[in-house]
Amino acid sequence: MKLRSVFDASVIKSEFESAGINPNFVIPIWKYVIQNPDCVWDEIPSLPSAAYSLLHSKFKTLTSSLHSLFHSSDGTTSKLLIKLQNGAFVEAVIMRYDTRLGLCGGKPRPGGVRSTLCISSQVGCKMGCTFCATGSMGFKSNLTSGEIVEQLVHASRLADIRNIVFMGMGEPLNNYNAVVEAVRVMLKQPFQLSPKRITISTVGVIHAINKLHNDLPGVSLAVSLHAPVQEIRCQIMPAARAFPLQKLMDALQAFQKNSHQKIFIEYIMLDGVNDEEENAHQLGELLKTFQVVINLIPFNPIGSTSQFETSTKQSVSSFQKILRETYKIRTTIRKEMGQDISGACGQLVVNQPDNKRTPGTVEPLRDIEDLHL
């Protein structure tokens, strides 16, 4: 019988209840496993005897393992290649930000380095976005909630994780129940992350967006919009055909009305496709009634056969200026991290990274946390 992850919350709590074991013992088990990831069940102190028997027969401390670890040349990014129990691989990325360099109100922020973990929710992805390496893999399988949480467990051995973004491999809202359960685990002991420091990204799965605030109040929503009109969205994001732009905007309006939270808009800049001044005005008109932060993302190469090119710095700057000055919309330009280990946005695909690129100049970075301000 396939053993389940001890971090599959609903499964272990159900098994404990069925066996007459108080499910409150799950929290100290998680805490012990996090602190002692190579432990065996009998080493965990003060559990009922029935709990040891159940753990041995049905659960593993960790069903996944850290197969490989790659560090960017500038030290800001680490990519974890994680091997699952079924032999498949997913990737997670740790991004480190020095808050003493990220300026806020003209002054350095206190605190030093903080880390954000980019988590995967699926093996591969069925959305098929033409600018994304993960989409080239196709969809393989959903991760269980435990496999999602285990990415945080592995990463926590390397850094003190403060923020979580579901922007890794897969469409999180296509694995809705597992993602919701995993986030609920992250919000409780022993992780105790704040909901405002967890962001779930989606290409626009409307029916799931309509449920998200009720199921995960306080958790942030990021939308991979990438185009201001439906025609361009369908051209570069085939799944957009199932999520018409106007219906998506209606869902976002309802989400914002209920949550009173900013929505993060992800917008990849593709030369000659969606980066013209006309596109900036279309985007501004589309979003001018929302409270949003637009994050302009330079396109990251995903191989020599890519049909796209990165927008020029001048095009990105002009695009940002229109959104800021004409429409008064807060707009940032993402400083890409981890390109030299294929760990940047859109580059996550299970392969070996190219370590031959020459690192660029290190600039002050802003974290997703800063965008809430």
Image (spheres, rainbow, N blue to C red):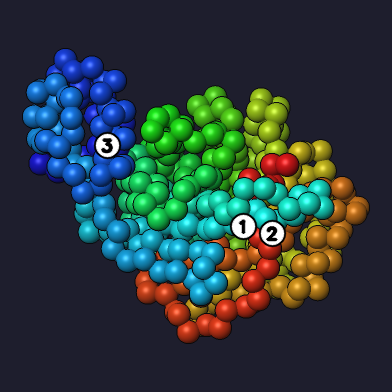
The answer to whether 61 appears left or right of 296 in the picture is left
Q: Which residue is mark 1?
A: 98
Residue in the picture at 18% in, 25% down: 46
Q: Quadrant of the C terminus?
A: top right
Dot 2 falls on a residue whose secondary structure is: loop
Q: Say how many tags the image has.
A: 3
Amino acid type at image mark 2: Leu
Residue 116 locus on image (x, y percent): 53, 51
Q: Nearer the viewer, residue 359 or 182?
A: 359
Mark 2 touches mark 1? (CB < 8 Å): yes
Residue type at tag 1: Asp
- For disc 3, the marked residue is 32
Give the Cα distance between marks 1 and 3.
Answer: 30 Å
> What residue is shown with label 2?
101
Residue type at mark 3: give it.
Tyr
Q: In screen coordinates, is 149 left or right of 133?
A: left
Compared to residue 70, the image places residue 125 above or below, namely above
Quadrant position of residue 49: top left
Q: Secondary structure at mark 3?
A: helix
- Residue in the image at 64% along x and 71% along y: 362
Q: CA distance from mark 2 to mark 1?
A: 6 Å
Query: Among all residues in the image, which is located at the extreme right?
Result: 326
Q: Is residue 209 left or right of residue 289?
A: left
